Amino acid sequence: MAVPLVQLTRQPLPVAETAAGAPMTPARKPSWLKVKAPGGASYRHIQAMMRELGLHTVCEEARCPNIGECWEHKAATFMILGDVCTRNCTYCAVSHGTPKAFDPAEPTKLAEAVARMGLEHVVITSVDRDDLPNGGAEAFAGCITEIKARLPETSVEVLIPDFKGSERALQIVMDAKPDILNHNLETAERLYRLARPGGRYDRALRVLANARAMDATALTKSGIILGMGEEWDEIITCLRDLRRSDVNIVTLGQYLRPSDGHLPVVRYYTPDEFAELREIGLRLGFSHVESSPLTRSSYHAWDQAKSARSPEISPGLTDSLLVPAVETR
């Protein structure tokens, strides 16, 4: 697939370092990253329902800054297969270790929660379960099937792990017909060993390309978090690589350090820079680009699905869409 040529080159910003040479977290969080603490009526209702049904949300486990806004809009991202991950990504707040056994009733419980909430669009993700034969693919398929059986008009988005590159596992998920298949690229290839030691940059891209090949009617989606030490040109490379994998929707948001034991924030990107990246993404041919400091993979997912479907799924790009190179600053 030919991808429009968009190249923006900037001088790297100076980054403060510790005596050991490691980047330091900027001293103060910018004002645009401050959000209201959650606690409204819908928030409390959803929290109680999750406890009652024994379900988990990535909203809580990953300490998402948008939890208050999304839950007040009766939107949540469900996390299946437990709340303990078999991998240990150095930017992620989810616990890691030895997970509990899979609950076979989880798809039914999740579908019940979706029905109670009256969701028009639901997002389902999971921890990595490298201990399971197909990485938990059957659980994703079960959830999709249960939800569509109860609520055929509800669109289902799945944010999957890489299943260690297993095409069999991916096929199990795609056969259940999700409306959107999401797998996050997360960061630049250079930072993978540091941030995602259990993942592989090229494997993530193959998962997305294979999903489109398995079902051309499904939308594909990926996300990038910024601020862990990538350069501007590396962000553009990520976007171009995702378009080469025929990804339709992309999200870009600011990395926020969950604790002192996680990777430090190397820099905070401004709202204007996120707006600039949105324009670049649209020029590259993405159907929808969600880009802001507070954007997370599932942020405004219901709007993303509608936007990317209108007027139709974006076709693969051709050489006729090439545009001149652009340089800034």
Image: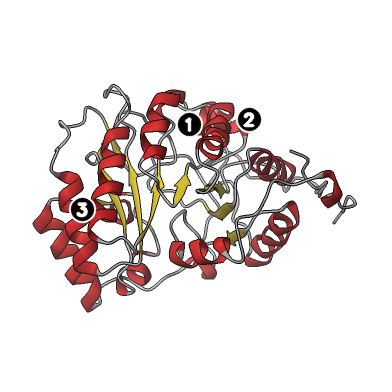
Choose the circle earlier in sequence order: 2 or 3: 3
- The correct choice, above or below, for 136 with respect to 159 in the image is above
The x and y percentages for residue 189 are 62, 31
Q: Nearer the viewer, residue 229 or 14?
A: 229
Q: Label 3's element?
A: helix
Q: Residue at x 68, y 39 (%)?
A: 244
Asked whether residue 9 appears in the rendered view, the answer is no
- Say which mark, if any, is on residue 110: 3
- In the picture, the disc for residue 196 is 1
Say which residue label 2 marks. Answer: 190
Alpha carbon distance from label 1 to label 3: 28 Å
The residue under the point 66% across, 41% down is 238
Q: Is residue 85 above or below residue 55?
A: above
User: Disc 1 vs disc 2: Cβ atoms closer than 8 Å?
Assistant: no
Q: Residues within 10 Å of mark 2 (few under 14, many from 20)?
A: few
Residue found at the very far left of the displayed protein: 52
Residue 197 in percent (x, y) is at: 47, 26
Q: Quadrant of residue 126?
A: top left
- Of the numbered discs 1 and 3, the one sitting upstream in the chain is 3
Disc 1/disc 2 C-alpha distance (Å): 11 Å
